[in-house]
Image (cartoon, rainbow, N blue to C red):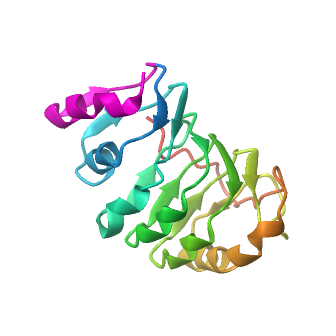
Amino acid sequence: PDVGELTETVARDKGVDLGNLGLVGPIPVAVLRWKFVEGHDVNLRDNAALELPANIGELGDTVATIALSHHHLRGRIPEDIGLCTALRELWLVNNDIEGAIPASMQRLKQLEMLYLSFNSDLQKPPGIKGDHLVFGIKKTTQRFLASLTANRGARPGSPARRRKGGSPERGTM
């Protein structure tokens, strides 16, 4: 089923379990707003092939956290993510994200925590070493974002940076 068809159900309920339903396609911005801005309980885990929506920027300055680790997300991080100017945390660990990290993320001046590890087809900028792409301090996150213009030459599966300490698990449900 298409995840968009379930948006009206989500809007009526205080919480909804959309996990393990074989859903495919972009997650409607209304569902992301409901989950991450309004704080409703929406389970999206273990679906077939969900994607971040191309119009994710419609969340604008209303969303501080997007936590979708371990959700089997596919596709690319949309360029529109740079319009989520209040975003402080982005958790996309252990998905199937591919392509380059969008340079538009340089506009995310509030972003402190960026967790993109274990997305094997995500292109990393040159010079990133290790198998993790994790930044948990605002200064290092912003330094990384500033380097994104050089990202276009990276190849899929390039090494990533490893953060000292434990592995991030936020964004799991």
At horizontal 81% and vertical 51% (from top left) the residue drawn is 156
**In the rendering, at what x and y percent does residue 173 appear?**
43, 34
* Screen quadrant of the N terminus: top left
The residue nearer to you, when weighing 12 against 112, is 12
At horizontal 62% and vertical 65% (from top left) the residue drawn is 102
Q: Is residue 163 above or below residue 85?
A: above
**In the rendering, at what x and y percent does residue 133 appear?**
70, 58
Q: Is residue 136 above or below residue 121?
A: below
Instruction: Give the farthest residue toward the left.
Output: 12
Could you say which quadrant of the image residue 154 lies in?
bottom right
Q: Is residue 42 left or right of residue 12?
A: right
**Segment tinted magenta in the rendering:** 1-21
In reply to whether residue 113 is colored magenta, the answer given is no
**In the rendering, at what x and y percent does residue 103 appear?**
62, 72
Q: Is residue 133 above or below residue 139?
A: above
Q: How many dots with numbers?
A: 0
Q: Is residue 127 left or right of residue 20?
A: right
At horizontal 75% and vertical 46% (from top left) the residue drawn is 121
The residue nearer to you, when weighing 163 against 21, is 21
**In the rendering, at what x and y percent does residue 94 appear?**
63, 41
Q: Is residue 17 left or right of residue 27?
A: left
Could you say which quadrant of the image residue 106 lies in?
bottom right
Does residue 64 show up?
no
Q: Is residue 62 left or right of residue 165?
A: left
At horizontal 56% and vertical 37% (from top left) the residue drawn is 70
In reply to whether residue 18 is colored magenta, the answer given is yes
Does residue 104 show up?
yes
